[in-house]
Amino acid sequence: MFRMLLLLCLALPALATEERASEERAREIIDEMEQLYRGGSSDATMTMQVQTPNYDRTMTMSGQSFGKDYGFFRILGPKKDRGIATLKRDEEMWNYFPKINKVIKVPPSMMMGSWMGSDFTNDDLVKETQLIDTYSLDLIETNDQYKVILTPKEQTVTVWDKIEYIMSKDPLLPLSQAFFDEDGEKIRELTFHEPREFDGKLMPSILEMRPLNKEGHLTRIIYDDIKFDVPDITEDTFSLRNLKSRF
Amino acid sequence: MLTFKIALRNIMRQKRRSLLTGLSMTGGYMLFVFSYSLLEGSYGNIIDIFTLDNTGHIQIHKDDYLDRPKIYKTIQNRDQVEAALTDSPEVKSFTPRVFSPALAYAGDKTAPSQMIGVDPDLEPTVSRLRQKVAMGTYFSASPNPDGYYEAMIGRGLALTLKLDVGDEIVLISSGADGSIANDIFVVSAIIGNKTSFDRMAVYLPLSAAQTFLSLGNDVHEYALLVNDKDENEAIAGRLTELLPDVTVSPWQKVESTFYRTMQSDKQGNYFTMGLIVFIVFIGVLNTVLMSVLERTREFGVLRAIGSRPMQLVRLITLETFMLAFISVMVGFVLVLPIIYWSSEVGMLLPEPVDMSGMEFQNLKGELSAKVFYIPMAFILATAVLISIPPGFRAARILPKDAMGSH
C-alpha cells in the first residue's frame, strides 16, 4: 500500500513534465518544419484554382514572404484581375486594386471573409503563423506520423475550437490540418500533396482547402516555383508604397 | 305578360312610395358605383405608377432569383427568351437588367449602393428611367473618350458621397466568378429625388455592368410591358409554357406584399359597400312587406279566382325587380357624368403623393364597364332576393282569411 502511494507521488510530477515535454516537442517540430520552407525570405509563383458549383476560376500569382510576419501577394493573371495585390504586415492586411488605384485596409469584421474569392479567409493569411502562439499543443506520435492537437489557450480569442495537424516524420512534411468548431464538428480541411524539391528544399507543392459545410467548394494552390533567401526581398518590399507601385 | 302588366300597375298605383323606395335604391347604386370606381381607380393608379415606373407588368428571372437573388442565378439563353418575347404579339416591350449590391466610393467617402445595369436603349421602352433624370444627361452605352463608362446615380447617393454630374465614382462588388469587381465610372446624371426607391442606386449601361460583374452576356431579369395590363397574369402563364427554363412572374407576384395588402384592403372596402346596399335594402324590404300586407285582400281575390301561389311570388319579385331596374337605370344616367369627371379630372389631393420622383396630385376614379355593371348586378340580385320572403308570405294567404280581413 505505502509503496503504491509512493509510486503515485513520484509518478505525478513525472506525468506533468511529460506533458510539458509534449508541448515543447510539438512546438519544436512545427518550428522546424515551418523554418524548412519559409526560411528568411521566399519568393514564389503559384496558381490558385477555385472550384465552386457555380464557377471555376484559375489565377496565377506571385507571393513573397519575409520572416513570419510579412507577406505580399500579387495576381498576375487573368488579365482582368492583374495587379490586384494583398499586403500583410503582422496582423494587418491591405488590398490594392490597380484599376481604381485604391488601397483598402481589410477591417477586422472582414477577417473571416474570403480572400480573393477563394476558400481561404483573410484570417488564414494573417494568423497562419500565430497558430502555435495562441493555441496549446499536444503531440501524439505514431510510427511514421506526428499528430499535433491544437486547443486554444485559456483567455485567448480564437476562431477554431480545435485543430488537428498531421505531419509525416520522414521526410518531415505537413499532411493535413483539420479545423473544428465549438460543437466539435469538422468544418474544413487543408491537405498537402505532391512534395517536390524547390531550391534544394522538399515541400508539398499542392495545398487543397476544402470547406466541409459547403458542398462542391475547393481551393487548390499549386506552387509553380519558389526560391528561398532572396536578397531582393527586404522589409521595404512590404510597404504600402510598394503595394501601390504599378508593376 | 299579364304578370308584367299587373306588376307595372302595382308600382304605378302607389307613386309616392315607389318613388321614395326607388330613390333610396338609386342613391345606394350611385354610392356603390362611386366608391367602387374610386377604389379601383386609385389602386389602378398606384399599380400603373410602379409597373410603368420600374417593375413592368411581367418579370422573367432564373429559378427563384426573385426570392433569393444570387449573382450567379442568371438567364443564359437570352436569344431564346428574346425571340419568344419578340414573337408574342401581346408583349409591348421588354428590357434586360442585372443587379448587384456594391460599395460606392467617392473621395474618402463610402456608401452602400445598389448597382443596376440596364440597356440604355431598351430601358426607356419599359420604365420611366429617362424621365427621372433630374440633373445631367441620360447615359449612353459606349464609354467616354477616356475609356470610362457613364453611370447615373440616385439623389441619396449623390448627397451622401457629395457627387455632382461629371465626377468619378468607384464601385467595388464581388463578381460572378468570385473575383473582386472594381472599376471607376463617370456620373452622367442624377436620378429622382431623396425619397425615390432608387435613391441609393447606381445605374450602369448593361454591357459595362456585365463586364464589371464578370457575367459574360448573362442577365438577371427581363422586365416587360404588355398591351393589355389586365391580362398580364394570363400572358405570364402563356410565356411560362413557351419558356420552361426560366420563371415568369406577373407583377402580382413580384410585388406580392403590396398585392396582398391591396387585396385585403379591397375586401374591407367591398364589405363596406355591401353594408351600404344592405342598409338600403332593409328599407326596401320594409316597403315590399308593407305593400304585401296592405294588399292582403287583393291577393286573396287573386288566389280565389285561380292564381297559383308561385304566380304571386313571381308577381312580387317582378315588381321589386322592375322598381330596382328603373332606379338603377336612373342612377346610371346620374352617376355617369360624375364618374367621367372623376376619371378625367379627379379630386385634387391636399398634398401631392410622390412616387419615386414622379408627383401625383389627383385621386382619380376608374371609368370602365365593370364599375357600372358589378354594382348593378349586385343591386338587382339583392332586389330579387329580398322580395322572396314577402312573396312567399303572399303565396301563403288563404282566400277565406284574406277576404275576412279588412
Image: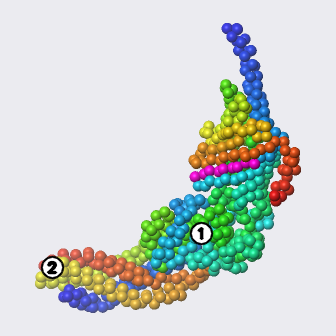
Say which amino acid is labelled 1: Arg
Q: Which residue is mark 2?
A: B308
Quadrant in which residue A10 is drawn: top right
Dot 2: chain letter: B
Seen at 70% across and 38% down, the residue is A195
Seen at 50% across and 64% down, the residue is B246
Magenta stretch: includes residue B329 = no
Seen at 69% across and 46% down, the residue is A221
Q: Quadrant of the N terminus of chain B?
A: bottom left
> B8 and B230: which one is in front?
B230
Mark 2 vs mark 1, CA separation in Å: 72 Å
Q: Which residue is mark 1?
A: B97
Disc 2 + disc 1, Cβ < 8 Å: no
In the picture provided, is A228 more to the left or to the right than B345? right
- Magenta span: predominant SS is strand
Residue B116 picture location, percent across and down: 64, 68
- The vertical placement of A44 against B71, above or below, is above
Quadrant in which residue B24 is drawn: bottom left
Q: Quadrant of the C terminus of chain B?
A: bottom left
SS assignment at label 2:
loop
Q: Which residues are magenta?
A: A45-53
